[in-house]
Amino acid sequence: MTNKERMLNGKLYLASDPELLAAFRQNRSMLEEFNQTSFRDGKRRGYILRAMFKKSGKYLHIEPPFYCDYGVNISVGDGFYANVGCVILDVCEVNIGSNVFLGPRVILTTASNPIDCEVRNTQLEYGLPINIGNDVFIGAGTIVNPGVTIHDDVIVGSGAVVTHDLESHAVYAGNPAKKIRDISDEERAYWKEEADAYRKEMEK
């Protein structure tokens, strides 16, 4: 396998491989343009992101500054929003569903390094994919580690460090992130009532 194939398959690889360096530099050029766009130029931002990512749905919005390694390993569904300072290290695939919202300074990192220092010092590294389902909110300053899956309908509290898979319909927080509670029917009803009240007030 090539270094690129090894990288995408979770095996040790060298990031200094010419093919990977060329892809990295191309992405850096696109990121530089994206991060220098005016806030008035939303169409240009959207065009750059769609050209950068492997797959993107409707209503894609990321606030600069934004950083990623390659871009081509990132797939996002409809209604994706990331606030300022988002970092996605996509040496492996990052698959994100629909209606996912990231707070400021969220880090999704598929990249990792060998525990053995002698191997690590040879510049060999590896990665594991990250998968995020639909209807997920990830709070400010959260770090999602390599190999993690976050299932549908999950809230992750600010500053969490996610080291293991998170199951659906629950709230998680802490370092390492742990389940705080399920999302209850009472909570859902409360927020639906609040939303209805808001809409009625705005219609007056």
Image: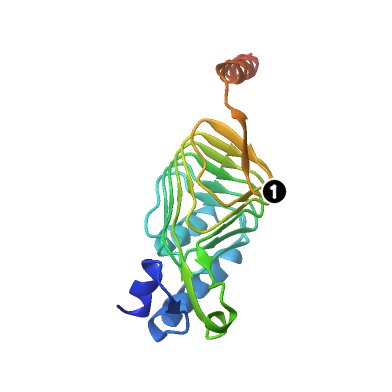
Residue shown at 49%/54% (left/top)? 43
Position in image of residue 69 (x %, y %): 50, 69
User: How many numbered marks have been drawn onto this rendered protein structure?
Assistant: 1
Could you tell me which secondary element the residue under label 1 belongs to?
A: loop
User: Which residue position holds label 1?
Assistant: 159
Mark 1 neighbour density, 10 Å: few (under 14) some (14–19) many (20 or more): some
Say which quadrant the C terminus sits in.
Answer: top right
Residue 85 quadrant: bottom right
Q: Residue at x 42, y 79 (%)?
A: 20
Q: Where is residue 66 drawn, in percent x and y?
A: 59, 61
In the foreground, 40 or 144: 144
- Percent position (x, y) of residue 113? 54, 72
Which amino acid, by three-letter code, is at mark 1?
A: Gly
Residue in front for this viewpoint, 46 or 70: 70
Q: Residue 78: x and y, percent?
A: 42, 42
Colour scheme of this structure image?
A: rainbow
The answer to whether residue 146 is above or below residue 159 is below
Q: Residue at x 49, y 36 (%)?
A: 135
Residue 47 or 14: which is nearer the viewer? 14
Q: Quadrant of the N terminus?
A: bottom left
